Amino acid sequence: MAGEEELQSECCVLLSPIVLHADVNDMWIWQLHASSRYNVTNVYNYLTARDQPLDYNQPKTIWRKEVLLKFNIYA
């Protein structure tokens, strides 16, 4: 329970500065690139260019597919 309450508190802190306006359409903004558009390449570059290692068991396997190449190409 205490962990859930802590997460809820963190979410409230993160969401409190957000203001919603009834007369404005919602839209997503990607802040990792100047174009504000999501791009897998930009995410990959962000994740692999960090000064600190990623918090994964095997950071070298990021987005490595465990399927045969011909299936990956077909998909």
Image: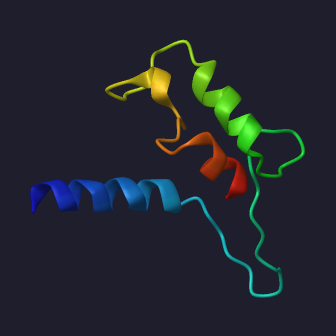
Q: Who's the residue at 48% across and 15% down the image?
A: 52
Question: Among all residues in the image, which is located at the extreme right?
Answer: 35
The answer to whether one can see residue 32 in this image is no
Q: Quadrant of residue 45?
A: top right
Q: Position of residue 4 (x, y in %)?
A: 20, 61
66 to 28, vertically: above or below? above
Total labels: the figure holds 0
Q: Is residue 47 left or right of residue 5?
A: right
74 to 21, vertically: above or below? above
73 to 15, vertically: above or below? above
Q: Who's the residue at 31% across and 26% down the image?
A: 57
Residue placed most toward the observer, 52 or 69? 69
Question: Among all residues in the image, which is located at the extreme left?
Answer: 1
The answer to whether one can see residue 25 in this image is yes
Residue placed most toward the observer, 28 or 49? 49
* Display colour scheme: rainbow
Question: Among all residues in the image, which is located at the extreme bottom?
Answer: 22
Q: Position of residue 62 (x, y in %)?
A: 51, 32
Q: Is residue 71 left or right of residue 65?
A: right
Q: Position of residue 32 (x, y in %)?
A: 73, 39
The C terminus: image quadrant: bottom right
Q: Who's the residue at 41% across and 62% down the image?
A: 12
Residue placed most toward the observer, 69 or 25? 69
Q: Position of residue 74 (x, y in %)?
A: 70, 56
Q: Who's the residue at 67% across and 38% down the image?
A: 43
The N terminus: image quadrant: bottom left
Q: Quadrant of residue 53?
A: top left
Q: Quadrant of residue 47?
A: top right
Residue placed most toward the observer, 75 or 54? 75
Q: Is residue 37 left or right of residue 72?
A: right
